[in-house]
Image (cartoon, coloured by chain):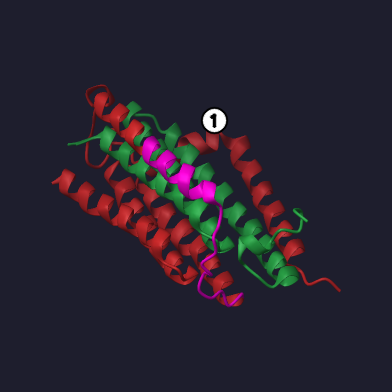
Chain colours: A green, B red
């Protein structure tokens, strides 16, 4: 018997690590991976609450999140490839066309 | 026993996430994210979401992370350069993140009794399986959203092809 609270704490820790690596990492691919980590943490929260309320709709919501995440990964990686083609770099500090 | 399972895979999750944060090479970060996703699949299973556990392995660690690995290899991404980055990220972001963890942990532990306990393997009655229950709702009540997602994926494929195409 594991308290639901532990699952929620695990999700909170994973989400916070995702935020931290989103802020610290400089490589655009790794930043994108930390977004995926945050999505996973939220999915865990949905599954935990679906279990608590004994409802299936939370799990279906996670299913839709997975579908959207797959679409997002495809489009995001295409954008990363386009950026690399024009700028020849993956470092977000060097992608500052809008700044100058 | 259920608690031991949760602790083992929860620690694996957090260790993989921290490894993602501390590794310098993107391919190492991608592989540690695969570890996080596989451990999360086991945790979904302990919560009685067998379908999601399978979908997590197939969609996330199978499809999305393979796509990431392909792009890392295609772009020949090397080690991250250590740049100064934004000072605000270090001095506001890290204490802010620690504060969020502390606050949420306090709230969840405070409401532990109200949140209840997880039963290993789910709380649905054993007569109906998790997959049949999900498919019943998905193909009756939520048929329209389910069909709309196929259009979303089609648009995403077209968008990816257009964006990644070499300009003449």
Q: Is residue B133 visible?
A: no
Residue drawn at (30%, 34%) of the image:
B105
Q: Is residue A55 above or below residue B138?
A: above
Q: Residue B91: x percent and y percent?
A: 46, 45
Q: Determine the image quadrant of residue B166.
A: bottom right
Q: Residue B81: x percent and y percent?
A: 53, 70
| SS label for mark 1 | loop
Q: Determine the image quadrant of residue A57.
A: top left
Residue drawn at (44%, 48%) of the image:
A40
Residue under label 1, please give it. B141
| Closer to us: A79 or B24 | B24
Q: Quadrant of the C terminus of chain B?
A: bottom right
Q: Residue B4: x percent and y percent?
A: 16, 48
| Closer to us: B106 or B82 | B82
Q: Is residue B103 visible?
A: yes
Q: Residue B159: x percent and y percent?
A: 73, 57
User: Is-magenta flag for residue A69?
Assistant: no
Residue drawn at (32%, 43%) of the image:
A10
| Closer to us: A83 or B43 | A83
User: Is-magenta flag for residue B87?
Assistant: yes
Relative side of B64 to B38, left or right: right
Q: Badge 1: how crowded within 10 Å, few (<14), some, or many (20+)? A: few
- Range of magenta residues: B75-100
**Outermost residue toward the left?**
B1
Q: Is residue A71 above or below residue A44?
A: below
Residue drawn at (30%, 48%) of the image:
B43
């Amino acid at each position: 018997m594991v308290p639901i609270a532990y699952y929620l704490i695990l999700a909170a820790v994973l989400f916070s690590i995702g935020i931290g690596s989103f802020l610290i990492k400089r490589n655009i691919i790794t930043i994108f991976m930390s977004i995926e980590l945050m999505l996973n943490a939220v999915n865990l929260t949905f599954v935990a609450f679906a279990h608590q309320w004994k409802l299936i709709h939370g799990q279906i919501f996670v299913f839709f999140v997975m579908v959207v995440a797959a679409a997002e990964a495809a489009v995001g990686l295409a954008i990363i490839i386009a950026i690399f083609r024009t700028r020849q770099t993956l470092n977000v500090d060097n992608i500052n066309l809008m700044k100058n | 026993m259920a608690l031991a399972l949760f602790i083992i895979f929860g620690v694996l999750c957090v260790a993989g996430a921290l490894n993602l944060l501390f590794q310098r090479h993107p391919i190492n970060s991608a592989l540690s994210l695969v570890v996080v996703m596989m451990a999360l699949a086991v945790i979904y299973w302990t919560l009685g979401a067998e379908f999601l556990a399978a979908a997590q392995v197939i969609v996330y660690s199978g499809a999305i992370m393979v796509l990431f690995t392909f792009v890392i290899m295609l772009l020949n991404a090397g080690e991250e350069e250590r740049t100064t980055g934004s000072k605000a990220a270090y001095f506001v972001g890290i204490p802010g993140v620690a504060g969020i963890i502390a606050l949420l942990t306090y709230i969840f532990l405070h409401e532990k009794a109200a949140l209840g306990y997880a039963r290993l393997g789910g709380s649905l009655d054993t007569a109906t399986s998790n997959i049949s229950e999900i498919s019943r709702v998905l193909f009756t009540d939520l048929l329209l959203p389910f069909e709309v997602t196929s259009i979303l994926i089609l648009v995403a494929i077209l968008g990816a092809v257009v964006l990644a195409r070499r300009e003449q």
